[in-house]
Amino acid sequence: MADVSDPAISHAYHDVRSDKTDTNWLLLAYESDRSDKLLLKATGTGGLAELADALDDGQAQFAYVRVSYSNDKQSTRSKFVLVTWIGPATRVMRKAKVSVQAADVKRVLPAYSIDVPAHERRDLDEEPIVVKLRKAGGASYDGV
């Protein structure tokens, strides 16, 4: 099991979900290579691109992101994405634990539209994620 008891995680989660703050992502990282305790590593306002820059190639990490997009000129939607990052240089034992520990993360970051597994930074390119969000959103009038 992952320890997700850090109170900063809950605070950052509510910031990302709030329309009253500019914070649109948070990043959780393991306390150390041998620890199963997750801590809030960073938050930001620059969306998926800024988040991708913050990821560590040698770690497994979890992120929560608000993605805003428009279907037409009059409306904008905000949806939430849970990202499970497994960097290309992540140790084998950490990789093995991530799928089980993701359930603990989902308990503290429960409201999201899609879950995105990421192994390369390009997995966080905004356009394909918005397409997935549109598909997950139900009615789509633009042919997606």
Image (tube, rainbow, N blue to C red):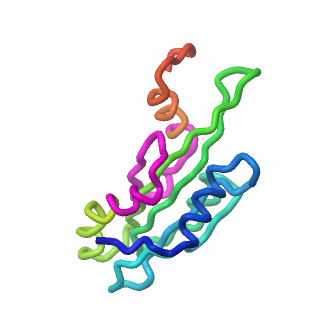
Q: Residue at x 57, y 16 (%)?
A: 142
Vertical side of 126 occupied by 1: above or below:
below
Vertical side of 46 occupied by 4: above or below:
below
Instruction: Say left or right for 1 vs 47.
Output: left
**Which quarter of the figure has residue 71?**
top right
**Which quarter of the figure has residue 130?**
top right
Query: Which portion, as a residue range, is magenta?
Result: 103-128
Relative depth, front residue between 35 and 52: 35
Relative depth, front residue between 43 and 111: 111
Q: Residue at x 46, y 34 (%)?
A: 132
Q: Position of residue 120 (x, y in %)?
A: 44, 58
Is residue 105 in the magenta section?
A: yes
Instruction: Say left or right for 130 vs 85.
Output: right
Q: Residue at x 56, y 38 (%)?
A: 127
Instruction: Say left or right for 1 vs 7.
Output: left
Image quarter hosting the N terminus: bottom left
**Number of numbered markers:** 0
Q: Position of residue 23 (x, y in %)?
A: 69, 57
